[in-house]
Structure formats: C-alpha cells, structure tokens
Image (cartoon, rainbow, N blue to C red):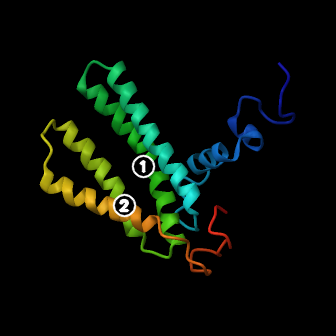
C-alpha cells in the first residue's frame, strides 16, 4: 500500500487532517487538540455541529450499550464512560461559544448537569422526579438559548471578533 501522506505515519489519523472535509476536521480538532481549551471564541455553526455530533454519539452509545450488554451495570458503565469522554470537549466548546456571545460561562454547565442527573437517576432505577426535571430542563433550554445569541460584534477579553459571526 502506498503511503498517501509521504513523510507522515500512514496509521496516524492526524496525518489525514488536511484531506478531511471541513466539518469532520473541525470535529476532530475539537475532540483532540481543543478539548480542554476553555479560552477563546467559537461561532454558532461550529457549536451546533459539535452538539449535533454529541447527541448522535450519545444516542449510538445508548443503542450499542442496550443491544450489546445483558447487565445493567455494564450498560451504565459504558454510558458513564462515554459521557465522560464527551463531557469535557462539549463543556469547552460551550464555554467558548458563550465567550463569543460575551455571556457568563456558567450557562455551559446546565446541559452537563442535566445529562449527569439523567444518568444518575437511571442508574438508581427510580421513576422520574418532575420537580427536579422541570427546572433542570427549563434551565438547559435557557442555556441553549443564551448560546444561540449572535456573536458579540466587537473584540472582548476572550479574543478578536471574526467579522462575520461564522467560525474562525
């Protein structure tokens, strides 16, 4: 087999970054290089692409966990490990999105709290407690609304304005 990237390791995914479609490249870079970068700014399009990937990832993980396991403990172990894998990068991109809108980064933690509470309630096999679910769901919806605000049209303490409101 001929090496498609001469001078680079053909078995290393990073050697193919230049040839990836831009959407896949952004997801790959957010998951590998920028997964702990809580500074800077991120546009709405990149934020939504990442959160769509996160929802699809968790749905596929739940499906695999449900079909491939027979015990609840293994099912929950797979779900919690999968959530921990995606929790830090999704929180980081949410914080960067809030920085772009010039809002407080505390809103980025609401979706993570809701996902954690959902997994914990499922692990304890309890019925849904609507007195907790309703406010958590409402706060999560408000946090996504805040993250959907347009970019702040000036430079702020987290970075320069990109000019178009699109990804940088």
Can you tell which mark lies on residue 53? Answer: none
User: What is the x, y in percent for residue 121?
Assistant: 19, 43
SS for tag 2? helix
Write down the residue under mark 1.
Answer: 87
> Residue 54: x and y, percent?
46, 44
144, 30: nearer the viewer: 144
Q: Quadrant of the N terminus?
A: top right
Residue in the picture at 17% in, 55% down: 132
Q: Please report contact status of discs 1 and 2: CB closer than 8 Å, yes or no.
A: no
Figure check: 38 above or below 48: below
> How many numbered circles are shown?
2
The residue pinned by badge 2 equals 109
> Horizontal and vertical percent for residue 66?
32, 24
Specify which label sits upstream in the sequence, 1 or 2.
1
Q: Quadrant of the C terminus?
A: bottom right
Residue at image x 21%, y 38%? 122
């Amino acid at each position: 087999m001929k090496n498609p990237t001469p001078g680079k390791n053909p078995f290393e995914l990073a050697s193919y970054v230049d040839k990836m479609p831009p959407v896949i490249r952004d997801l790959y870079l957010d998951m590998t290089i920028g997964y702990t970068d809580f500074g800077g700014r991120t546009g709405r399009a990149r934020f939504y692409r990442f959160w769509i990937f996160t929802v699809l990832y968790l749905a596929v993980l739940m499906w695999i966990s449900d079909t491939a396991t027979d015990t609840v403990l293994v099912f929950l172990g797979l779900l919690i490990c999968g959530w921990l894998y995606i929790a830090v990068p999704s929180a980081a991109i949410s914080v960067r999105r809030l920085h772009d809108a010039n809002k407080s980064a505390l809103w980025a933690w609401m979706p993570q709290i809701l996902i954690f509470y959902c997994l914990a309630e499922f692990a304890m096999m309890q019925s849904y407690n609507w007195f907790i679910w309703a406010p958590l769901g409402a706060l999560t919806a408000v946090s996504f609304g805040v993250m959907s605000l347009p970019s702040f049209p000036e430079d702020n303490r987290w970075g320069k304005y990109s000019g178009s409101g699109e990804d940088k």
